[in-house]
């Protein structure tokens, strides 16, 4: 018999979780104003809200925590991360920040001015919010194939070079401070960007003299997909692929809470000293002195080790295999999901799942609430609530895709949990025709409203 694949780690510490009753959940979600961010974690059985900061650290990371150097300036922990970043990404300069959006805040404070355009592939919500907060515009240049959830395409995160060239050629260079390539592209379904696309974006950017930065939260997962799917990379190691990927960029922002498998942390990696000098002013202002920038020494140590853990092939194979395991169970049953499966999450196509709900009633949010009531599984809406209102017109923005994301924390749940999640979704799918009413917004914030929005059932 051919031996099956199995997890590339075993479990040393466990955390109890509890199942609840449907009656309890109906009450709790009503009290939470139908916003899953308002639930207590104790009210959730399998928490797939996010894969951000929710992973399990390795024994090597925990042992590194004990060696943390908490010196205000020049801590050995700072140099440990600096060396790991140089080793893995090739970037010479680095600034620590407390998480990914802080890296965006610091870098954009240095680079983006009012009225600028920032082209990219479906910018993540905090990235877009940081651009719009500076009265600038994020221009989505993702390939059209990304918006067809049924279409099989190996690199749905790719930038459409024609769309990009249109932005670059029709606007003065001074108005385009940078291009942002998100690897993997979270908003389009955790979809990877190919090495060829990165190379071509870099060539085009050079032609127009515009720097390229990668939003790199899931760069290792992106590298795994390149190894598995792109011609010429099957024999390369993940770290060789990662090095080549970053060789096409001028810098990166990182949410270390994803592929560096820590509970908190972020950083900016840079190739140019001028950018480092400009950004470090804002880092000291917003985050902290340049050798800690919002992180404690022990957390920097865990991060340095996490960068190595997260770029091991066996780990990535287990991780992405688990996401696909859940995806395949759903696909086999006919549940509409973004295909191919993403690296960190399964994205359920809510428009096709609940065709009876009009977009004005927040389709993906309605589905996420139903799934919670069904099984205590917490997913998240990636749809029109998250898309916020148009800052100019104040109208709701309805993105092409209404998705419910089920993000899988790293090294945290077993495949039996995935079976449980699949069963809960399938139960909702079986009764989808009875779900005919969605939700209405009662109160909302002007920006990033999904975190605090209050809704009621129609
Ligand atoms: N960029 C991407 C692609 C992200 O997915 C995230 C966070 C950030 C930047 C911001 O990083 O949270 O450390 O400030 N994504 C989380 C998620 C929140 O659930 O997908 P952060």
Image (spheres, rainbow, N blue to C red):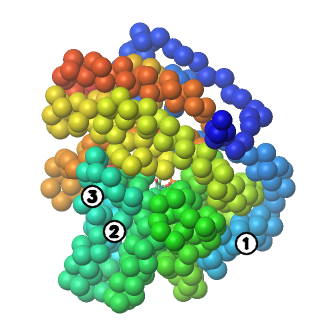
Percent from the top left, x then y, of residue 198? 43, 74
Q: Is residue 258 visible?
A: yes
Seen in the picture, residue 175 relative to 43 is either above or below; the reply is below
Look at 47% across and 35% down and name the residue there: 326
Look at 39% across and 72% down and name the residue there: 197
Choose between 292 and 350: the one closer to the eye.
Answer: 350
Whether the residue under disc 2 has CB within 8 Å of ligand 1: no
Compared across the picture, whether 258 is left or right of 407 comes to right
Q: Which mark is residue 158?
A: none
Q: Could you tell which of marks 3 and 1 lies nearer the N-terminus? A: 1
Q: Which mark is residue 159?
A: 2
Question: Label 3, on which residue?
Answer: 145
Choose between 298 and 335: the one closer to the eye.
Answer: 335
Q: Mark 2: give few (<14), some (14-19) or many (20+) Cα within 10 Å.
A: many
Cα–Cα gap, marks 1 and 2: 31 Å
Q: Which of the two discs, 3 and 2, sits closer to the camera? A: 3
Cα–Cα gap, marks 3 and 2: 11 Å
Cα–Cα gap, marks 3 and 1: 38 Å
Seen in the picture, residue 149 relative to 265 is either above or below; the reply is above
Q: Secondary structure at mark 2?
A: loop
Q: Which of the two discs, 3 and 1, sits closer to the camera? A: 3
Compared across the picture, whether 271 is left or right of 202 comes to right
Q: Mark 3: give few (<14), some (14-19) or many (20+) Cα within 10 Å.
A: some
Look at 23% across and 37% down and name the residue there: 351
């Amino acid at each position: 018999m051919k031996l099956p694949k199995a997890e590339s780690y075993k479990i040393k510490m466990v955390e109890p979780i509890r199942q609840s009753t449907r009656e309890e959940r109906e009450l709790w979600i009503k009290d939470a104003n139908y916003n899953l961010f308002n639930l207590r974690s104790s009210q959730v059985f399998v928490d797939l809200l996010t894969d951000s900061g929710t992973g399990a650290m390795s024994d090597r990371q925990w042992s590194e925590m004990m060696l943390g150097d908490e010196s205000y300036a020049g801590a050995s922990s700072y140099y440990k991360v600096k060396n790991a970043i140089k080793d893995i990404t090739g970037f010479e300069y680095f600034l620590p920040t407390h998480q990914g959006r802080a890296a965006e805040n610091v870098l954009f404070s240095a680079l983006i001015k009012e009225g600028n355009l920032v082209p990219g592939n479906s910018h993540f919500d905090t990235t877009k919010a940081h651009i719009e907060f500076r009265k600038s515009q994020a221009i989505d240049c993702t390939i059209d194939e990304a918006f067809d959830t049924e279409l099989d395409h190996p690199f749905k995160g790719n930038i459409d070079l024609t769309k990009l060239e249109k932005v670059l050629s029709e606007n003065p260079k001074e108005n385009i401070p940078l291009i942002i390539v998100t690897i993997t592209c979270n908003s389009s379904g955790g979809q990877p960007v190919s090495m060829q696309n990165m190379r071509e974006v870099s060539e085009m950017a050079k032609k127009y003299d515009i720097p390229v930065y990668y939003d790199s939260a899931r760069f290792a997962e992106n590298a795994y997909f390149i190894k598995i799917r792109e011609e010429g990379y099957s024999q390369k190691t993940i770290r060789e692929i990662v090095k080549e990927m970053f060789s096409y960029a001028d810098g990166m922002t990182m949410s270390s809470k994803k592929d560096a498998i820590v509970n908190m942390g972020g950083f900016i990696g840079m190739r140019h000293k001028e950018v480092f000098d400009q950004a470090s002013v804002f880092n000291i202002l917003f985050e902290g002195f340049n050798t800690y920038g919002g992180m404690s020494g022990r957390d920097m140590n865990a991060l340095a080790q996490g960068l190595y853990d997260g770029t091991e092939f066996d780990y990535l194979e287990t991780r992405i295999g688990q996401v696909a395991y859940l995806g395949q169970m759903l696909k086999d049953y006919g549940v509409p999901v973004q295909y191919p499966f993403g690296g960190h999450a399964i994205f359920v196509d809510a428009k096709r799942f609940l065709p009876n709900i009009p977009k004005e009633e927040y389709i993906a949010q309605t589905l996420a609430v139903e799934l919670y009531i069904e099984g205590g599984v917490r997913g998240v809406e990636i749809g029109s609530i998250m898309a916020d209102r148009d800052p100019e017109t104040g109208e709701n923005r309805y993105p092409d895709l209404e998705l419910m994301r089920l993000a899988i924390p790293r090294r945290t749940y077993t495949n039996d949990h995935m079976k449980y999640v699949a069963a809960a979704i399938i139960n909702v799918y079986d009764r989808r025709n009875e779900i005919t009413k969605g939700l209405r917004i009662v109160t909302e914030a002007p920006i990033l409203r999904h975190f605090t929005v209050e809704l009621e059932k129609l």
